[in-house]
C-alpha cells in the first residue's frame, strides 16, 4: 500500500506540473501535440481536439509536447510563432503550478496540525543559548541574516552552518534583544547545537493557515536552495541525492510507521511529504540547466533582451545534450537509491 501511495503522490505532482504547461499553452493558443503522465510505452492513449492524451507505463515523469524545438512549422498554433512572453509564461507555469500545489497542501496540513512558532520551549544548560541568557518563552525573530517565522528555520540554519558563531535576535515581553551563539558539539548526537528546542504546534485559523502556508513554502524553497549550494561546494556528496526509487522508499516507510495511528496521521504525513516534493520539484525545474524549464527560460530571456531568437536547432542541441546528461544522472541516482535501500 505504501508503494502505491508513493506512486500516486509522485504521479499527481508531475501531473500538476505538466498541467501548468498545458493550461498556459491552451490559454495562449498553442497547439499541444501530446499530454502524458509517466514514461515508456502507452497504457492508455486518446486523441481529443488535436491533443493526444496518454498514461504511460512508468509513473516517474510526464510531458506536455508543444513542438518547442520545431523550427519548420508556420502554423498559427505553433509554439515558436507565439510572442516570447507567451512562451515564457508557458515554460514558467510548470514550476509555478508546483509551488501552488505545495501551498495548497501546506495550508491543509497546517489547518490539521497547526504551525510551529519560533518560540523557545526548552533551553539546555551548558549550551550557547543558556549562556547568552535566552529563556523559555522567548521568540526568535532572526538568525544570522535570515528572518525566522517557524522554528524549523532555526534548526535548518544550524544544520547548514554547523559550528559557526551566529547572531540571533529574539523578543521577550515586547522588547528586542540580540545575542551571539557559539554552538557546542553534542557528542552523543554528533553535531553542534545551540541548546534550544521548540514546543508543540499552535492551532491555526484559516487566515493563519494561509499566512503560515506561505512561510512553509518559503522554508522548503530556501532549504532546497541551501542544499544545492552545499552540493556545489562539495559539503555534501552526490551519493546523497535521491530519485524516484528513494522517494517511493521514503513514502512507504512513512506509511508503515504511521498506519497504526490511523488514517488522519497517515494523511498528515503524506501531505508533509507532498509539500516537500512539490516545492523541491519546482525549484529543481527552475535551475538554469539545459533540458530543464530553467534552461529553456534562459534562452527565452536572452531572446527577450536581444529581440532575436537563438536558432532553434542550436537550442535543441543544447537541450538534447542536457537531457542526455540528466538521464545519466538519473541512472546514477536510481542505482544509488537501490544500493542504499537493499545493501
Image (tube, helix red, strand yellow):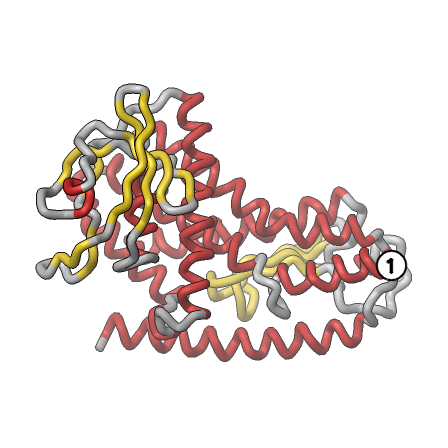
Q: Which residue is mark 1?
A: 307
Residue at x 42%, y 48% (from the top left corner): 220
Residue 324 appears in the rendering:
yes
Q: In terms of depth relative to the viewer, which is nearer, 175 or 200? A: 175
**93 sits left or right of 58 in the view:** right
Is 179 placed above or below 330 here? above
Residue at x 77%, y 61% (from the top left corner): 302
Q: In terms of depth relative to the viewer, which is nearer, 35 or 290? A: 290
Is 284 placed above or below 107 here? below
Give the x, y percent position of residue 111: 35, 28
**98 sits left or right of 247 in the view:** right
Residue at x 73%, y 59% (from the top left corner): 66
Give the x, y percent position of residue 320: 66, 76
**111 sits left or right of 280 in the view:** left
Q: In terms of depth relative to the viewer, which is nearer, 117 or 268? A: 117
Q: Residues within 10 Å of mark 1 (few under 14, many from 20)?
A: few
Numbered disc total:
1
The image quarter containing residue 78 is bottom right
The image quarter containing residue 153 is top left
Residue 44 appears in the rendering:
no
Give the x, y percent position of residue 105: 43, 38
Where's the C terminus, which quadrant?
bottom left
Is 211 placed above or below 23 here? above
Amino acid at each position: 500500500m505504501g508503494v502505491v501511495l508513493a506512486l500516486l503522490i509522485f504521479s499527481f505532482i508531475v501531473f500538476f506540473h505538466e498541467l501548468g504547461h498545458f493550461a498556459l499553452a491552451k490559454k495562449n493558443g498553442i497547439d499541444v501535440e501530446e499530454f502524458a503522465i509517466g514514461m515508456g510505452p502507452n497504457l492508455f492513449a486518446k486523441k481529443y481536439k488535436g491533443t493526444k492524451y496518454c498514461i504511460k507505463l512508468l509513473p516517474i515523469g510526464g510531458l506536455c509536447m508543444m513542438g518547442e524545438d520545431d523550427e519548420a512549422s508556420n502554423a498559427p498554433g505553433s509554439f515558436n510563432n507565439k510572442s516570447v512572453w507567451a512562451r515564457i509564461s508557458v515554460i514558467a507555469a510548470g514550476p509555478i503550478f508546483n509551488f501552488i500545489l505545495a501551498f495548497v497542501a501546506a495550508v491543509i496540513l497546517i489547518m490539521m496540525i497547526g504551525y510551529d512558532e519560533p518560540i523557545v520551549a526548552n533551553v539546555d544548560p551548558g549550551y550557547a543559548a543558556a549562556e547568552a541568557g535566552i529563556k523559555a518563552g522567548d521568540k526568535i525573530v532572526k538568525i544570522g541574516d535570515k528572518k525566522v517565522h517557524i522554528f524549523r528555520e532555526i534548526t535548518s540554519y544550524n544544520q547548514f552552518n554547523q559550528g559557526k558563531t551566529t547572531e540571533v535576535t529574539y523578543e521577550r515581553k515586547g522588547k528586542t534583544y540580540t545575542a551571539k551563539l557559539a554552538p557546542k558539539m553534542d557528542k552523543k548526537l554528533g553535531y553542534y547545537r545551540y541548546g534550544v528546542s521548540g514546543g508543540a504546534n499552535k492551532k491555526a485559523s484559516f487566515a493563519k493557515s494561509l499566512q503560515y502556508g506561505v512561510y512553509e513554502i518559503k522554508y522548503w524553497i530556501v532549504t532546497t536552495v541551501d542544499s544545492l549550494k552545499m552540493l556545489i561546494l562539495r559539503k555534501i556528496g552526490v551519493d546523497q541525492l535521491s530519485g524516484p526509487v528513494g522517494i517511493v522508499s521514503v513514502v512507504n516507510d512513512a506509511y508503515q510507521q504511521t498506519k497504526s495511528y490511523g488514517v488522519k496521521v497517515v494523511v498528515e504525513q503524506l501531505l508533509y511529504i507532498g509539500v516537500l516534493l512539490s516545492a523541491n520539484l519546482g525549484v529543481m525545474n527552475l535551475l538554469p540547466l539545459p533540458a530543464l524549464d530553467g534552461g529553456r527560460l534562459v534562452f527565452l530571456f536572452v531572446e527577450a533582451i536581444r529581440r532575436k531568437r537563438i536558432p532553434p536547432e542550436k537550442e535543441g542541441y543544447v537541450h538534447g545534450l542536457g537531457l542526455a546528461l540528466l538521464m545519466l544522472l538519473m541512472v546514477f541516482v536510481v542505482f544509488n537509491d537501490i544500493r542504499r535501500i537493499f545493501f
